[in-house]
Amino acid sequence: MKNNQAYVGEDSKILEFISQYGNGSKVLDVGCGYGRILRLLSGSGFKAVGVEANTEIVESCRLAGLECISPDEFDNSPKQEWDVIIMSHIIEHFSPRECFNMMDHYLDYLKGGGILIIATPLLTEYFYEDFDHVKPYLPLGINMVFGVKSAQVQYRSRNKLQLLDLWYKKYFYRATNSRDVYLNDTAFFTRFIKFFLKIIFIISFGYFGKKDGWVGVFRKIL
């Protein structure tokens, strides 16, 4: 899994999208993990609550002073509407049916005119290095299910979305494992190659890099 440096530009884009398109300050971070984005939101003056399935991580977030609850606690709490819902690096961990049900469920809590922000990886040669990754999703696929226009797919949501903006994240080229080769991340040669490729990426202002994820902002219209 990539370290936190890989998310710096992505997190900035999420905050930018909230400032540009959001109409309020109540933000729900679904699948918040250890609260990386929650900290940024709280520091920017937003009322932010995280939902996390791993109970140990929920406790860790609470000990860090972050407001974090489990999905069961969320479902059993008094219903409220949110101005912004974030799903950062969560949808790729679900099968299509599970992803559809999860998204439609939380979109029930997004107010009309509110925004959903999705950050997710593209299919790259290192996508499946994450043990939990199931399937990459594209903006077009989200529109087929949650958009207004009918598409020949087996899922149709009760919540409708309109894509407002889209940003693709780039990352420096990296050497990857294959069936025949395992790269030891602690070996000098591997670290040197990684450092060299990262420097090339920086001095070329991202030109010598690879698109490996996207951040999209959608408005709830129904």
Image: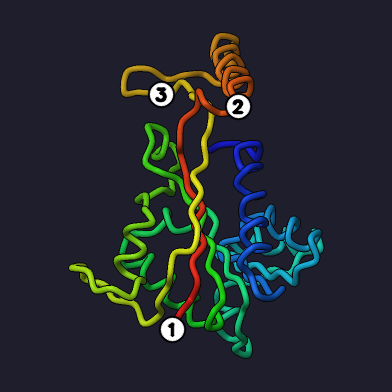
Q: What's the amino acid at mark 1?
A: Leu
Marks 2 and 1: in contact by CB < 8 Å?
A: no
Neighbor class of circle 2 (other Cα within 10 Å; few <14, some 14-19, many 20+) is: few
Element assignment for label 1: loop
90 or 8, nearer to the observer:
8
Secondary structure at badge 2 equals loop
Which is nearer the eye, 34 or 16? 16
Residue 205's label in the rendered image is 2
> Residue at horizontal 68%, vertical 63%?
19
Q: Earlier in the sequence, mark 3 or mark 2?
A: 3
In which image quadrant can residue 155 be found?
bottom left
Q: Which residue is mark 3?
A: 177
What is the three-letter code of the residue carrying label 3?
A: Asn
Q: Which residue is mark 1?
A: 222
Which marked residue is nearer to the observer: mark 3 or mark 1? 1
Could you tell me residue 51's position as x and y percent?
A: 61, 68
The outermost residue toward the top is 189
Per the model, the C-alpha gap separating discs 1 and 2 is 40 Å
Distance from the alpha carbon under mark 3 to that under mark 2:
26 Å
SS of the residue at dot 3? loop
